[in-house]
Amino acid sequence: MLTGMQIAVIGGDARQLEIIRKLTEFDARLSLIGFEQLDHAFTGAVKEKLDEVDFSNIDAIILPVAGANLEGQVETIFSNEKVVLTEEILSKTPAHCTIYSGISNAYLNAITKQSKRNLVLLFSRDDVAIYNSIPTVEGTLMMAIQHTDFTIHGANVVILGLGRCGMSLVRTFHSLGAKVKVGARKTEHLARITEMGVTPFHLNDLWKEVKDTDILINTVPQLIVNASVISKLPAHTLIIDIASKPGGTDFRYAEKRGIKALLAPSLPGIVAPKTAGQILADVLVQLLQDDLIIRKGKVE
């Protein structure tokens, strides 16, 4: 249980609702910031504005998957108010206060470091990323079907990257009968691709490998699908880029060539927010319980 813990949940999308529900079930007391337009009420959770919260009592802060932008603004789907997380706010929290986010950036790294607060990135955990790959793959498959006029079976599909999402994508499209090629850099990834029964190639040779591509799926958060690659693609190719914003595709050049290129980060929150929220909630409860046990042990 999380009895006695005071947690601030700041902004987010429908995934945060599952987190809030789970935390209240475990008896945590919650301050909900950026949720004034949310109709639903949760027992043990109070909607507050940022300047109304007494951060000196906050044991943990939970941010949305995207964390905060480079100006410190936190996305708030259920509010029209601008919410900005600052180093000054974090410094008001107790020294043991931990900040939880999906991912981070230079701004969030800087303010947590300056305030000497622990930052935990949920998407850096293998378990979260692997579970999250399930709704990601389903969302990618949905987009592939919606935006093409041919079957996945028999289609030439190129997948870039063999991370947690990449591996799940390869298995799914291969099992549906697609002719799958996978680009990677690490020798162990190239070996695994071969073992999986699909065609490997080194990402340095990407431009040579795309001439017959029907669907190109990028998971690499670097500009890898550049103009030289796009120039080799057939006009009917569909590009689905699921890497973190701004993706790894030259969308301007794709549009110039008349190739449909879709940027689709955070697919779990779009296609399956309930499942994606439950994944995060389960991990957060375990982390918060561990933190509470450690703090109680230090006090005793």
Image (cartoon, rainbow, N blue to C red):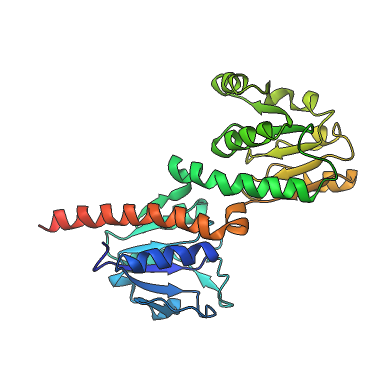
Give the side of residue 274 with respect to residue 220, left or right.
left
Task: Tell me the quadrant of the picture where the N terminus can be found.
Answer: bottom left
* Residue 187 in the image, given as x and y percentages of width and height: 57, 19
- Residue at image location 72% in from the left, 31% down from the top: 177
Give the side of residue 1 with respect to residue 241, left or right.
left
* Residue 237 in the image, given as x and y percentages of width and height: 83, 39
- Residue at image location 50% in from the left, 75% down from the top: 35
Task: Tell me the quadrant of the picture where the C terminus can be found.
Answer: bottom left
**Of 197 and 87, which appears nearest the observer?**
197
Q: Is residue 160 visible?
A: no
| Residue 178 position (above or below residue 53) | above
Total number of numbered labels? 0
* Residue 18 in the image, given as x and y percentages of width and height: 46, 64
* Residue 24 in the image, given as x and y percentages of width and height: 35, 69
| Residue 96 position (above or below residue 11) | above
**Of 102 and 144, which appears nearest the observer?**
144
Answer with the quarter of the image where residue 168 lies.
Answer: top right
- Residue at image location 75% in from the left, 49% down from the top: 262
- Residue at image location 89% in from the left, 43% down from the top: 257
Q: Is residue 204 visible?
A: yes
**Of 265 and 282, which appears nearest the observer?**
282
Answer with the quarter of the image where residue 54 lies.
Answer: bottom left
Give the side of residue 88 with respect to residue 175, left or right.
left
**Of 236 and 123, which appears nearest the observer?**
236
